[in-house]
Amino acid sequence: MSLPLPAGVERVLFTEEQIHERVRKVAAEISERYRGRELKLVGVLKGSVFFLTQLARAIEIPVKIDFLSISSFSSKSGSAGVVRIAKDLDDSIEGEDVLLVEDIIDTGFTIRYLLQTLAGRGPNSMGLCTLLDRTSRRIVQVPVDFRCFEIGDHFVIGCGLDYKQLYRNLDYIAVMNPEILKKSV
Ligand code: IMP
Ligand code: MG
C-alpha cells in the first residue's frame, strides 16, 4: 500500500528501509570507533533531529545528546556564507568525545564554523557524522568521519530536510520537484 507522493516530491531517492539499513550500519561503525567510551551526539536543529534520534537508538555504547541551532545569512543561491549560533548547547563539552550530527553537508560553511567553534571548547575529540553529503558543491573542506549517503546536485527533502520548513516528516528522502522550486524564486 503506498500513499500518493506530495506535490513537492519529484522522485524518491532513498526509501525508509534503505535509510534504516544504512543508519544501522553507520551506528555500528560509530559504536566500534568509540567502544569503551561515552559519546555526546550534538545535533544541529532542526534538520538533524530525525536522523539523530534514529542513529542514537542504533548506537550500542552510552550516548548523551545536546542540540544547537544556527542562523546563516545566505546569498541568493542558497546556503553559504556567514553563520552564527542562535541557540547554544545546554551543557559544556569539555573533555567529552563529541560527534557533530548534520542532515546534509553542502558548501561546508556551516560545519566548518561549528567544528571550529566547538573544538575551541576543549572536547576530548571532535567528530562529524552526516546523513547526506553533496561533495560536488563543497567550497570549504571539512573532515567527514561518518556519512550515510553521497548525493548529486539536486535539492532534497524528507527525513528532517525541509523546503520552507515543510516536508521534514517524510519517511523517505526525495528530490524536490524543480517546478515548485522555480515558482518560489
Ligand atoms: P552548507 O553550509 O552549505 O554546508 O549548508 C548546509 C545546510 O544547508 C544544511 O544543514 C541544510 O540546512 C541546508 N541545505 C543544503 N542543501 C539542502 C537540501 O538539498 N535540502 C534541504 N536543506 C539543505
Ligand atoms: Mg541544516
Image (cartoon, rainbow, N blue to C red):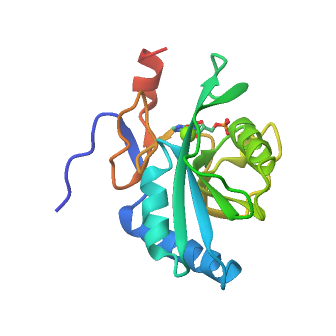
Q: Nearer the viewer, residue 7 or 88?
A: 88
Does residue 25 appear left or right of residue 83 in this picture? Answer: left
Q: Position of residue 2 (x, y in %)?
A: 20, 58
Q: Nearer the viewer, residue 8 or 80?
A: 80
Q: Nearer the viewer, residue 115 or 74?
A: 115
Residue 74 sits above or below residue 62 on the image: above
Number of numbered discs: 0
Residue at point 80%, 36% (across, down): 139
Does residue 100 appear left or right of residue 121 in this picture? Answer: left
Residue 183 sits above or below residue 133 on the image: above
Residue 116 sits above or below residue 143 on the image: above
**Residue 44 visible in the current orientation:** yes
Q: Quadrant of the N terminus?
A: bottom left
Does residue 24 appear left or right of residue 144 in this picture? Answer: left
Residue 143 sits above or below residue 10 on the image: below
**Residue 78 visible in the current orientation:** no
| Residue sitting at the far left | 1
Q: Position of residue 59 (x, y in %)?
A: 52, 76
Split into quadrants, the picture shows ligand 1 in the one at top right
Residue at point 49%, 67% (across, down): 55
Q: Position of residue 12 (x, y in %)?
A: 40, 51
Q: Position of residue 144 (x, y in %)?
A: 74, 58
Does residue 176 appear left or right of residue 90 in this picture? Answer: left
